[in-house]
Image (tube, coloured by chain):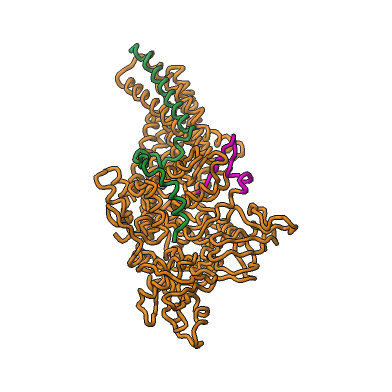
Chain colours: A green, B orange
Amino acid sequence: MPSLYLLIPIALLFVGLAAVLYWWAVRSGQYRDLDREADRILYHEPDPSKRQANDISSTEEGNDKP
Amino acid sequence: MNACFHCAQALPSKSNWRIEESDGSKSFCCPACMAVYQCIHAGGFDQYYARRSEPAATPVEALSTKNYRDYDGLLDSFDFVKYKESRYTADLLVTDLRCSACAWLLESVLGRLPGVQSVSVSLYQKKLSISWEEGRLALSDIMQCADDYGYPVEPWTEFARNRAQAETREQLQRRLGVAGLLMMQVGMMSIGLYAGDWQGMDSATQTLMRVASLLLSAIALCYCAVPFLKGAFSAVRHFHLTMDVPISIALLTAFGYSVYATVFDLDHVYFDTVCMFVFFLLLSRFVEARSRDVLHSGGGSLLPAVAQRRSRDAGAGAPASEYVLVGELRVGDQVLCKPGEVAASDGCLLEGESAFDESAFSGESVPVRKTAGDRILAGACNLDNAVWYEVTCPSNASSITRIDELAESVRGAKPDYAQLIDRVSPWFTLVVLCLASITLLAWWSEGLQPALLASLAVLIISCPCALALATPVALTAAQVRAREAGVIPMSPRFLHTLPKVTDIVFDKTGTLSETRLTVSAICTKGLSKERALQVAASLQQVASHPLALSFVQANTAALLTIGEPCQHPGDGVSGELDGESFRLGRPDWASQVLPSAELEMPQRSHSVLCSSSGVYACFSVNERLRADAEQTCEVLRANGYRVHLLSGDNEDKVTAAAQRLSIDDAHFAMRPEDKVDAIVNIREAGGTTLMIGDGVNDAPVLSAADVSVAMLHAADISKSNADAVLLSERLMALPEMLRLGGETKRIVRQNIGWAVSYNSLSIPFAMFGLVPPWAAAIGMSLSSLIVIANALRLKRTPILARPLVSSNSHAAAGFPALKRVAEHA
C-alpha cells in the first residue's frame, strides 16, 4: 500500500484547507444569520422598470396615510 | 378570503379597504395596511408576499408620526452611529422583522436610496446595519423609509454587550466546525485501522495512519477542546468540581495513552474517541448558547433616545428648545412630548392636555386623559397633542425601572434548573474519579499498562456523555419542535417545569384580547347603525387617535366630506354635515350642544354622536378576544388545568371577558404587586403556575410564576422575565406546549434511565478489566446515539396546523420548496 504514503498527506492537506476555508467563512460573517441564507436563492431582483417610481412614491404615500 | 392581505389579521365584518387588481381583489383590515401594500407594490417588491412565511406586523403606529428628524441633530453623540472617512454607519433595531422575506424587502428598499453604500439585515438579531455617504442622506430619511414599508426602527442599544456576545458565539461556531471536520477525517482513518485489526495490516501503514490521526486529534485537543480544558483548570484551581473536570481528564488520558500506544506500537489508539467526544460536547454547548440568546435582542427599548428640552437659560437669541440625550435629563427640566411620542421620563404635565396610552403599565385598554398637574409615566405613548411636562425623577428611578427591580427581586426566589445540575455534578465527578483511582491502584500490581488501560476504560465508560446528553438533547429536540409551533423557549426551565403545571394564569389586555380596539354602535336614534358608523368615521378622519382608527375600521361605507372638521383634544371631534353641526366624543362634552340637559344613554357608552337636535348614536369601545381564546380555555379545562384571569383593567371589561371564556376565577384592577400576591396564593394552595402576559405591569408576575410565557409584542422587560415567547398570536400553542412538556419529561426520564443503567452495569466490568478501552469507546458512542435517537422522537409530537397566510397558499402552488415553507408557517 505505498500509495497511502501519498494519499494520506493529501487528505490531511484537504482537511487543513477545508478548516481554513470554514474559519474564513465564519470570520467574514457568512454564518452569522443561519435563519436567512437558506431562502436567499428564492429572491430575484425586483422589476427594474418600477425602480424610479419607488423612490418618489415611497415618501409621498408614506406621509398621506388617511 | 377573510384575512387582511398584508397582516393576515381577521377582517372587520365588511371591509371597504379593497384594491381590485388583475390577479383578484385584495382586502385590508385598515388604511395603514393598505398604504404599506401600495408602497410595496409600487416599488415592484410584490414577491415579498409570495415568499414570506410569516404575516407582516400590523402597522398600528402608522397613524402617528414618529419624529425621526430628532435624531439628525445629535448624530455624532450616539454610540450606535459611527463615522469614518465621510461615511456613516448605523445599527438599528427592527422589531417587526418576521421572516427572511422581511429581511429581503428591507435590504432591497433601503439599498435603492441614493447614497447608501451597503445595507445588511440580520433576521437572527433583528438588526439592520447600514452605511451611507455623508451629506447625501440623513439618518431620518433611512428611518422614515423603513417605517413607510411597515418596519418602525429604533437605535440599536447595548452595542458593546451584543458585540462581545456575538464574538463568543462565533468562536464557538468556529471550534464546532473544525471539530466536525477533524472528527470525520479521524473517524475515516479509524475505520481503516479497525479493518486492519480484522483483516491484518502491515505495521508501517498502521503507524502512518496512527500518526496522521495523532496530528489531527492534537489540533482538536489544542484548539477545539480549549473551553473544556480551561474550565477544568479554573475549577481545579478554585477547589471546585464541575463536569469539565472528568471530561478533561478523559480527553487528556485518552489522548495521552494513544500517543503512548503510537510511539511504543501497542494494540489500540483512541484518537477517534477524542475527536468525537469534543465534537458532541461542542455541539450541545452551541445549541444551548444559540437557543439562549435567540430573541434576547428582540424587544424594542421602551424609552426614546432623544428628548426635546426647553432651554434653561432664557437669554435673548437662545433657541427656545434643544435636543438632548434622555440620559442627560435632570429633575426640573421641561420636556416636550409630541403626539405619537413616548414620554422619556416620569413627570408632571405642565400645560395642555392629551390622552396617554398606558395599557402596557396598567392593562387599562382605553387611553387615559391627562390635564395639567397629572402624572406622566415614562414609556407611556402620547396620543393626542403636544404637551410640556416637568421631569420629576431621573430616568434611572422612573416607574418602569422600579417595575424591573420588583421583577428582579422576585426572580431570585425560585430554584433554577441549572443550579440543580451544578449541585449534582461535583458528586458525580467525585465518584467517577474515585472509581478510576481505585481501579488504577487495584491493577497497579499487574503493571502500568493494564492498570492504565483498566482505569481509562472506567473513565471512558463512565464518561457522563450519555448522561450529560440525555437532558440537553431531549430539550433541544423539544425546543426545535416548540419553534415549529411558534414558541421560543428562553430558559431551560420552560420545558422542564411545564409537566408540573396545574394552574394557567392569563393576563387580559393584549394576551387574551387583541391589541386593537373595536367600536360598535350600541343604540341609535333615527339613523341605521351603518349610517351612524359612517358619519362617526367621517368625523374621526381628522383625529390621530388610535380610537379614531377603530372608528374608520368599523365603518363599511365610503367616507363623507365633513365641513369645518375640528379636533377637541381629550373630548372628541366636531364638524358639519348636510348643514347640521355634529359632535362626537365623550358623553358629557358632546351633550353640551343639546338644548336640554337631560341625557339618556346606556352605561357602557364611550362616545356619543349628537347635534343640537338630539343624540343620534352611542358607541361602545370593546376589545376583541383573540379568535382562539375560547377554544384554548376550553381545551385547557378539558385537560384538567385550572384557568385564572388577572387583569389591571376595570371590572366591566374583565367580567365580560371572563364570562365569554367561562373563567370562574377572574380578578380586575390589579396592580403588579397584587398579581404577584395572587400567584403566591395559588402556589401556597399547592398549585404550579403558568403565567401568560404581555404588559410592563406583567413583568414581576411573569418572573414570580413557576413558568411564564410572554407575547411577541410584549415589552422587552416582560420578555426578559419570561421563560418563553409566543411568536405567533396563536394561543392554542399553549396546550400544545403543555403536551410537549409532558412528552419531553417522559423522554428525559427514559434517557437518564438508560444512561444510568448502562453506566452502572458496565463500570464494574470495566473495573475488573473485562472491557478493553476500544469496546468502552464504542459502548459510549452507542449509548450516546441511542439517547439522541430517542430524543429525536420528540420532533414528531403533534402540533395543530398554524393558520396559513392567505397569499402563501396560491403562491406556493406548483413549487414544492415553497409549499414546504408555507406548510411550516
Most distant residue in the front direction: B579
Left or right, B76 with respect to A58, comes to right
> Is B21 left or right of B263, judged from the image as shown?
left
Q: Position of residue B12 (x, y in %)?
A: 35, 65
Q: Which residues are magenta?
A: B73-93
Q: Note whether residue B253 is visible.
A: no
Q: Is residue B226 above or below residue B69?
A: above
Which quadrant is the N terminus of chain B positioned in?
Answer: bottom left
**Residue at the (38%, 35%) spot, across then down:** B781
- A60 sits left or right of B819 in the view: right
Q: Residue B691, percent across and down? A: 46, 61
Q: Nearer the viewer, residue B110 or B562?
A: B562
Q: Quadrant of residue B764?
A: top left
Question: Residue A46: where, in percent of width, then height?
Answer: 37, 42
Task: Identify whether B434 is placed above or below B752.
Answer: above
Q: Quick one: B660 or B563, which is closer to the camera?
A: B563
For the view shown, which residue lies furthest in the top direction? A2
